[in-house]
């Protein structure tokens, strides 16, 4: 009986966990990097992303010029900061209009 309830709780927990969309994950990565350059393993751990998925994302962001790879890890660029600020303003406007919670 105990084993069944434990398995059942895990299933419910997985179903109730909200999946993040790609844009949210990208903005969370950029937000994390505003605190300074960081190694991918730290970003992966802090944002609860698999290392492989994060590396793929960081490579794409690097090609777009939003982050750069340096000796100290990945750093956000000026373009990345501008995108993040625009996203914050956009989300703030949506919240003001009660479109998003």
Image (cartoon, rainbow, N blue to C red):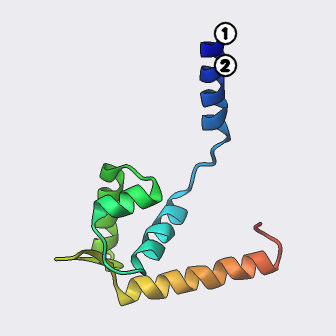
Percent position (x, y) of residue 42?
A: 34, 62
In terms of image quadrants, where is residue 58?
Answer: bottom left
Question: Judging from the image, what secondary structure is the residue with disc 1 in?
Answer: loop
Question: Judging from the image, what secondary structure is the residue with disc 2 in?
Answer: helix
Q: Nearer the viewer, residue 46 or 54?
A: 46
Q: Nearer the viewer, residue 95 or 35?
A: 35
Classify residue 64 as left or right of residue 83.
left
In terms of image quadrants, where is residue 88?
Answer: bottom right
Q: Residue furthest right?
A: 98
Classify residue 47 as left or right of residue 15.
left
Q: How many marks?
A: 2
Percent position (x, y) of residue 9?
A: 65, 28
Percent position (x, y) of residue 63?
A: 28, 73
Residue shown at 80%/80% (left/top)?
96
In terms of image quadrants, where is residue 15?
Answer: top right
* Residue at mark 2 to residue at mark 1: CA–CA distance: 6 Å
Residue bearing mark 2: 5
* Above or below 3: residue 40: below
* Above or below 64: residue 101: above
Residue shown at 56%/55% (left/top)?
20
Classify residue 7 as left or right of residue 79.
right
**Mark 2 in CB contact with mark 1 (< 8 angstroms):** yes
Q: Is residue 87 in sight in this rendering?
A: yes
Q: Residues within 10 Å of mark 2 (few under 14, many from 20)?
A: few
Q: Residue furthest left?
A: 71
* Above or below 42: residue 73: below
Percent position (x, y) of residue 33?
A: 39, 76
Q: Residues within 10 Å of mark 1 (few under 14, many from 20)?
A: few
Q: Residue furthest top?
A: 1
Residue shown at 60%/21% (left/top)?
7
Residue bearing mark 1: 1
């Amino acid at each position: 009986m105990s084993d069944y309830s434990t398995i059942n709780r895990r299933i419910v927990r997985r179903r109730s966990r909200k999946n993040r969309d790609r844009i949210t994950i990208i903005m969370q990565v950029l937000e994390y990097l505003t605190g300074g350059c960081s190694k991918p393993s730290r970003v992966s751990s802090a944002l609860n992303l698999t290392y492989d998925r994060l590396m793929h994302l960081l490579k794409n962001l690097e090609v777009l010029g939003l982050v750069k790879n340096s000796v100290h890890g990945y750093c956000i660029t000026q373009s990345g900061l501008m995108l993040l600020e625009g996203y914050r303003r956009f989300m703030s406007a949506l919240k003001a209009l009660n479109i998003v919670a």
